[in-house]
Amino acid sequence: MIEFESFTLENGLRVIFHKDVTTPMVAINTLYDVGARDESPDRTGFAHLFEHLMFSGSIHVPNFDTPLEQAGGNNNAFTTNDFTNYYDILPAQNIETALWLESDRMLSLAFTDKSLEVQRNVVIEEFKQNYLNQPYGDLWLELSPLAYKKHPYHWTTIGKSIDHIKNATMEEVKAFFDRYYHPGNAILSIAGNLELNQVKDLVNKWYADIPSRKKHIRNLPKEPVQNEFRTKTIVREVPSDLYVFAYKMPGRGKQGYYEADLISDILGHSKSSRLYKKLKKQEELVTDIDAYITGTIDDGLLVIMAYPDDHVSIEQVESSIWEELEKLKAKPIEEKELEKIINKMKTSKAFEEQGILNKSMILAFHELMGDANGINTETAKYEQVSIESIQKTAQDILHINNCSRLVIKSNEID
């Protein structure tokens, strides 16, 4: 059980506090309720661009990193399809340095032609290096629009095109900031050896005067039910072929989500999983195979990735995978197998929740989902999964007309 307190400022900022007496450090986590799914289809990559712009300095502080480093701290950030997250870790006695910096850039981020150009170039270079010039780097650039046709998950956090960032105007950037970067659209999560009254006083001191703004009402296009098998083959300079099978599944917390997550563990994710034992150990069709879920808030994907052995065809791999999927759909799993998978999940969650940074991030995420106490109740939801609900969910999602297949063929010559 992770204990916490919560309160909300008049300007709408939600605050979560977890007291941890085991560490001299404090984690300051700021989650903004904006991700790639909130972007315009012709201006993608903005949420990720802002992840960089937020470190360009505010009107009052030209360099975000230097004061934090002088206070013994460090920081970072990441962008997802669903939200953007910033965090700072520093000695607890220097907490005000982080609160000063975070509140100041929330209130008065500096917008200059120079900072926009610098960060624009950084993002463009990242696009090239990580997505265009890396083996398998464009996997999600290809798979996302194959699996999604209407919902904005059909582009990745980096965006659909370099041109969207290259052509971004200062007016568009400022409008994006005004819409999403304000107290009413943020969750501040603090973990460390502090007292609640101390945290309340400090948060009010640094954030209470930031003007509130109306929270943007999200109205995203709903993804239609997939009723067809989709496939695409691309040829790339990669070490070996890669076969990717993606199945639509319920979004985070929806009915069937926890079953689908456990199904991915049953199928892949370890050397004792069904697909690994069959295709790798028994049939020697692949050099590696894995299964996982994207874990998105809206309808996500259960993904199977297979690296075939030399001279093994897509037909051989696909046939063997489908055999295992059909077994899962036709025959209920044994109680012992379900218990083993749930125990692995519980162990994994226990490790994930270690440390003040992870606790602060997970608390903020569950608050975004509607209740920070989800950090304490989610395990019970996995434990409530039954043999029957596993089989039903497998039948619902693991069928050919719910599958999007991406084949990446190597053009390397033997």
Image (spheres, grey):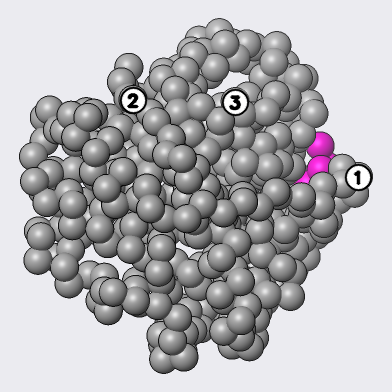
In the image, 150: left or right of 35? right
Q: Could you give the CA–CA distance between mark 1 and mark 3, rounded to whole angstroms?
A: 23 Å
Q: Residue at x 19, y 34 (%)?
A: 198
At horizontal 72% and vertical 27% (from top left) the residue drawn is 394
Circle 2/circle 1 CB separation < 8 Å: no
In this rendering, the label closer to the viewer, 2 or 1: 2
- Name the residue that disc number 1 marks: 227
The main secondary structure of the magenta stretch is helix
Marks 1,3: beta carbons within 8 A: no
As helix, strand or loop, the secondary structure at mark 2 comes to strand
What element does badge 1 sit on?
loop
Q: Residues within 10 Å of mark 3 (few under 14, many from 20)?
A: many
Q: CA distance from mark 2 to mark 1?
A: 46 Å
Q: Going from the N terminus, do you reach mark 2 or mark 3 first?
A: 2
Q: Is residue 22 above or below residue 92?
A: above
Residue stretch rendered in magenta on the structure: 399-403
Q: Which mark is residue 265?
A: none
- Quadrant into which the N terminus falls: top left
Label number found at residue 5: 2
Q: Is 401 inside the magenta-drawn segment?
A: yes
Give the side of residue 156 with respect to residue 397, left or right. Answer: left
